[in-house]
Amino acid sequence: MKSISAAVLLKNVSRLNILVVDGAEYLDGCGIVSSRVQRPGLALAGYFEHIRPNRVQLFGETEFNFLQTLPAERQANVLDTLAGLNRCLFVVSKELPIPASLLTAAKNHKVPVVTTAQSTVQTNNEISYCLDYALAPEAVMHGVCLEVCGLGVIILGKSGIGKSECALELVKNGHRLVADDIIRIKRRQHYIVGASDELLRDHIELRGVGILNLSDMFGITAIRQRKKIDLVIDFMDFDEWNRHTDADRAGLSAKTVTILDVPVPHILCPVSPGRNMAEIVELAAKNQLLKLMGHDSSKMFTDKMQTRINANRNNGGGANV
């Protein structure tokens, strides 16, 4: 089961300006395994059945107001039980004064306690979003990922076929690189997101030239950290493309490739000397964008041709178009 340490979580939610109140030495030890942030109201009332380990517990005004209604001994007991069941992370919103009984229970069970000035809702949303991404199902692909015309495009193909050269030309034309060589794919609900390996971020390799930092060469606008994937383009030799049973000259069949159980539109694109692959990828992205807007050029052309054929037949002519 995937997990993320509390230390990494706090680093990734820096916008919350979280401060560690106690237990900093335990931040690396607790592994968070669920993106769900729990509000422990029922647990404070004595219902512990649905408290799960390795989840973030978020305390706001509601929880602390209820705690104040409990006798001191009862308050200490429920907090000690909660800390024992969920040895993960206690987060306090709105920089509320933290009861001594909570700090004592957390210390007894080695649970870090942190606080933020942000509202409970904002804290919950920010932490949930971060955990949802960090704990999402993941895969690794070999290729190039770019943002082209606002769409996330992955270019696949055998080594040396020209993926990186095409990506460089697209960046020169104003599009943005997400990842070269290693693409880290994560599933977010019903779609997937591509990102670069941290070590390779901003870089691209060109055979005969070496490794280039595109952020340094073209500016920070040439790079995108991550992007939702809308289209996969497979580069292949012309001979291989002609032999491929799925090759489609008219573009009528809506092919998809499944990545992490998510179907993504898929194009097989032949490569040969003289073909401007960057321009072809750009046109493919624009065509996919039109399809998302309900404008399918291939289908419209076929419908017009069929209408012409039917009209000729009704007029007693042939099928000459």
Image (cartoon, rainbow, N blue to C red):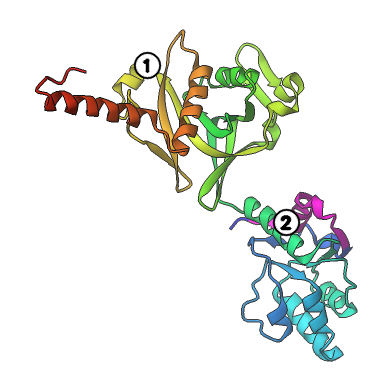
Q: Quadrant of the N terminus?
A: bottom right
Q: Is residue 212 above or below residue 87?
A: above
Residue, disc 1: 238
Badge 2 density bin: few <14, some 14–19, many ≥20, Cα 10 Å: some
Task: Answer left or right for 22 relative to 127.
Answer: right
Q: The magenta stretch spans which residues?
A: 3-20
Task: Please tell me whether residue 6 belongs to the stretch shown in magenta.
Answer: yes
Residue at image location 85% in from the left, 54% down from the top: 17
Residue 7 in picture, x, y percent from top left:
78, 55
Task: Answer left or right for 293 relative to 42.
Answer: left
Asked which secondary structure carries label 1, the reply is helix
- Identify the amino acid type marked 2: Glu
- Identify the amino acid type marked 1: Phe
Question: From this viewpoint, which residue is outermost toward the front?
Answer: 315
Residue at image location 78% in from the left, 78% down from the top: 63
Q: Using the image, tell me which numbered label, if any, was put on residue 211.
A: none
